[in-house]
Image (cartoon, rainbow, N blue to C red):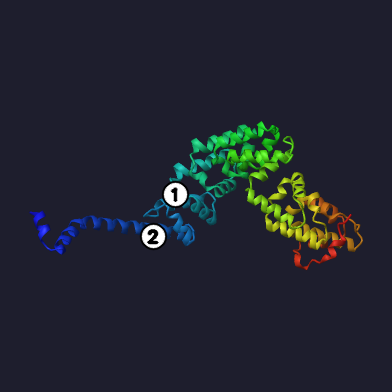
Amino acid sequence: MLNFLCKTVLNGTHCTIRAALAAPKSLSYSRHISSTSNQHSFTVSYLMNSCGLSPDTALSASQHVNFETPDRADLVIGFFKNHGFSESQISTVIQRVPLVLLADPEKTLLPKLEFLHSKGFTSPEIVGVVSRNPPILERSLKKQIVPSFVFFRNLLGTDVEAAAAVKRFSGILSADLDTFVANIDIMRENGVPETNIIKFIKEHPRVFMTDPVRFKRSVEEVKEMGFNASNVKFVEAVYAMTGMSKSTWERKVNAYKRWGLSEAEIIVAFKKHPLYILASEDKIERAMDFLVNKMGWESSLIVERPILVLLSLEKRIVPRTSVIKDLVSRGLVKKDIYLPTVFEYQEKKFLEKFVTPYMEASELLKLYEEKVDLSEMGREWNLLGKE
C-alpha cells in the first residue's frame, strides 16, 4: 500500500515522508556536530588561556587532543609547576606533545622524572631535559628510556658519562638504538679508533641518529677528501658532512668563493678545521667583510686559520682588537703583534696577557666589555696584525 501511495501522490509528499524517516538520524548527527564543536572550542580556549599557546598554535594542537573538562589537564599543569617548570617551558611541552594533558601525572609522568633523578640529574637538569625533548614524555619508561640509558652507560662507561650525553642532547633517550649501533659499526669498519668514536658520541650524539645510508655516504666522502680515519678531524668532518645537504654545502662553498677563495683552498681549510664550514652564510659574509675590509687582510687568511670564521665578532674579535689598538697606541705592546693568534686565545689567557698586567686594567676591561659598532671601524685597523 505504501509503495502504491508513494508512486501516486505528489512528489512533495514523497519528499516529506523521506525527510521524516531521515529526521532522527539528522538530529542525532547535528547534536554530535554541536557537541564536538563545543568540545573543540573549549580545548582551544583552554590551550590559550591555561597553557599560554597562541591562537594558531592552540588550534593546531587541538587537532591532536580534545577534552570537555579541565580536570585532568589542570592536574598535569599543576604537576609541571610543582616540579619546577616555568610557564614558558610548560607551553613548550604542551605545544610539542598536546596529548600529555590527558596523562596520569602520578602513573605516567612522575616515574620518568624519578628515573632521571636516580641517575644523578638535578631538578633543574630534569626540567631542561624534558623541555628540550618533550616527546620523551610519550616514550615508554621500561621499553625505551631505561634501555636507552643503559645502552649509553655501557658504551660510555658510567652513569655520569651517560647522563652528560643526555644533557647535551636529550633526544638520545628516544633514539632508535639500532640506528646508533649501525653508525658506530660504520665508523669501526672504516678504521676510526674506539677512543675517537666515544669522544664523538659524547660531544655530538645526535649525529649517530642519522640514517645509516646517509651516514655511510658522509664517511665515504670524507675519506675521498683525504682525511685520516685515525685522526680526530675525521669524525669532525663526518659530523659536518652529515649536518648539511649537498645544496647547503655548495652554498657555503660559494659564499667563500665570493671572497676569492678557490674550491681547493676551501677544502684545505676544511681539512684544517672541519667545523668552519658549518658557519651560516650570513656569518661567513660578516666575518669575511670584517677581516678583509676592516682589517685589510687577504681572504686567504681563512685557509690558514679557518677557526676565525667561527669566533664571535661582537664578543671576541672586535673587543680584543679594541684592547690591542689601545695598548699599541700607548707603546705597551709591539705594533706588529699578530692579531689572528690573539683572537684564538682562550679568555683567561687573553686577560692575563693583555689586561691584568697593566695599571689601567680597569679601563682596559671596560673597553674590552664595551660593544663596538662595526660600521664605525675604519681601515686604520689594517695597521695591526700583519707579520
121 or 331, nearer to the observer: 331
Q: Amino acid at mark 1?
A: Leu
Task: Return the disc, 2 or 1, that comes first in the chain's sequence.
Answer: 2
Q: Which element is circle 2 on?
A: helix
Q: Residue at x 49, y 35 (%)?
A: 143
204 or 332, nearer to the observer: 204
Q: Is residue 231 above or below residue 300?
A: above
Q: Which residue is mark 1?
A: 99
Q: Quarter of the image holding residue 375? A: bottom right
Q: Amino acid at mark 2?
A: Ser
Badge 1: how crowded within 10 Å, few (<14), some, or many (20+)?
A: some
301 or 323, nearer to the observer: 301
Whole-percent x and y of residue 283?
70, 57
Judge left or right: residue 125 versus residue 375. left
Quadrant assignment for the N terminus: bottom left
Count the marks.
2
Whole-percent x and y of residue 98?
46, 51
Residue 374 shows in this picture = yes
Q: Which element is circle 1 on?
A: helix
Q: Which residue is mark 2?
A: 41
Whole-percent x and y of residue 226?
74, 39
Residue 361 shows in this picture = no
Whole-percent x and y of residue 40?
38, 57
| Distance Cα–Cα, label 2 vs label 1 | 17 Å
Q: Residue at x 72, y 49 (%)?
A: 276
Quadrant assignment for the C terminus: bottom right
285 or 198, nearer to the observer: 285
Confirm or deny contact between disc 2 and disc 1 (CB under 8 A): no
Badge 2: how crowded within 10 Å, few (<14), some, or many (20+)?
A: some
Q: Residue furthest bottom?
A: 376
